[in-house]
Amino acid sequence: MKYFLIPAAAVCAALFAGCASQPSEEKALDFPAPSVTLTIQESGDAVPLRVGQYAKITLKENPTTGYSWYFKLDNGKRGPQPKSGQAVELVGERYLASNTRLAGAPGVREVMVKAARPGSIYVVGNCIREWEKNPQPEQTVRYRFDVTR
């Protein structure tokens, strides 16, 4: 009987260790103070920023449904979009889970945008199920950033 208890205790200890809450790498990411915070209500708006300022986009997200926000820069021209040298840069993002203990409760996706150089560009976010073939966005947001010196 005691030979059974030792392995059983080891298995229980391993299971409980796996359930211990670990700080998320995303939560540990520190963002600078934004000059402006944008929500879904500001989608379609022009956002003025000066070089070096930050904007934070904050949107509800519920990954348990399979939908998550994905962001890209769009200069309004057809064809491939340049990855660098744009008026703004997407400098970080994180998902903040809800403080409730309810399973499946939505949280918040935060995306930080930095004004890099003078110019205008769109930041477009699509809430999609990435694994689906030809995913159709459940929601789309679009902000035009106008950056000055």
Image (cartoon, rainbow, N blue to C red):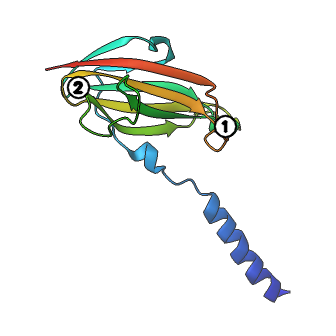
Instruction: Classify mark 2: residues with Cα within 10 Å, few (<14), some (14-19) or many (20+).
Output: some
Q: Nearer the viewer, residue 74 or 141?
A: 74
Instruction: Classify mark 1: residues with Cα within 10 Å, few (<14), some (14-19) or many (20+).
Output: few
Vertical comparison of 135 with 140: above or below: below
Q: Which residue does the image show at 40% across and 18% down from the upper left?
A: 143
The C terminus sits in image quarter: top left
Q: Quadrant of residue 117?
A: top left
Q: Nearer the viewer, mark 1 or mark 2?
A: 2
Please report whichever mark, 1 or 2, sits nearer to the chain's N-terminal start.
Answer: 2
Farthest residue, direction right: 1
Q: Quadrant of residue 80?
A: top left
**In the rendered image, which residue does mark 1 sit on?**
101
Q: Which residue does the image show at 38% across and 22% down from the upper left?
A: 76
**In the rendered image, which residue does mark 2 sit on?**
53
Q: Nearer the viewer, residue 79 or 103?
A: 79
Q: Which residue does the image show at 23% across and 36% down from the upper left?
A: 85
Q: Would residue 66 appear left or right of 39 to someone viewing this image? A: right
x, y percent for residue 128: 61, 33
Q: Nearer the viewer, residue 128 or 35?
A: 128
